[in-house]
Image: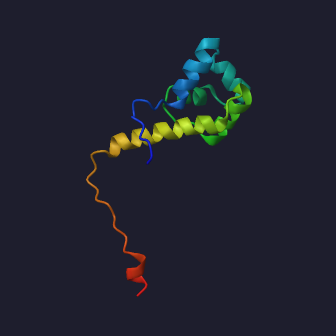
């Protein structure tokens, strides 16, 4: 049985990066953007939750901050799924029943 995480637990990876890495060390967005070779807007969009973290950007963060890109991508995926479940909770969609294999082979 799979455990279900409450959507309030899912945190956007950008918010986590901001509060756990940038703020405690007083790291500026401009500094990180230059170091990563990306625009300030790209970093700002991630940190403020306006866009999701890509695998490429996760790899860049891994090289700079020594945090596994798989961990960052899992955080992003968990957040995305929680958001999707919130939006699809009230959809009226019925389960799709596939025919039994033995029924179709005869």
State the image quarter where residue 55 is shown.
top right
In the depicted structure, whether residue 23 falls above or below residue 82: above
16 to the left or right of 64? left
Q: How many marks?
A: 0
Residue 23 coordinates in the image, percent (x, y): 58, 14
Which color scheme does this rendered protein use? rainbow
Tell me, yes or no, if residue 52 can be seen here.
no
Residue 56 coordinates in the image, percent (x, y): 66, 40
Residue 62 coordinates in the image, percent (x, y): 70, 32
Tell me, yes or no, if residue 76 can be seen here.
yes
90 to the left or right of 100? left
Residue at image position (32%, 60%) is 95
19 to the left or right of 58? left
User: Residue farthest to the bottom?
Assistant: 106
State the image quarter where residue 36 is shown.
top right
In the rendered view of the protein, which quadrant contains the C terminus? bottom left
Residue at image position (34%, 67%) is 97
In the image, 106 versus 21, the foreground residue is 106
């Amino acid at each position: 049985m799979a455990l279900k995480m409450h959507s309030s637990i899912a945190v956007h990876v950008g918010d986590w990066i901001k509060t756990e890495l940038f703020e405690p060390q007083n790291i500026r967005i401009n500094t990180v953007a230059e170091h990563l070779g990306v625009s300030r807007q790209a970093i700002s969009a991630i940190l403020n939750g306006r866009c999701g973290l890509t695998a490429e950007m996760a790899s860049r963060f891994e090289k700079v901050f020594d945090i596994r890109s798989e961990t960052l991508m899992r955080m992003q995926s968990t957040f995305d799924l929680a958001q999707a479940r919130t939006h699809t909770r009230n959809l009226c969609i019925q389960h799709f029943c596939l025919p039994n294999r033995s029924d179709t082979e005869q």
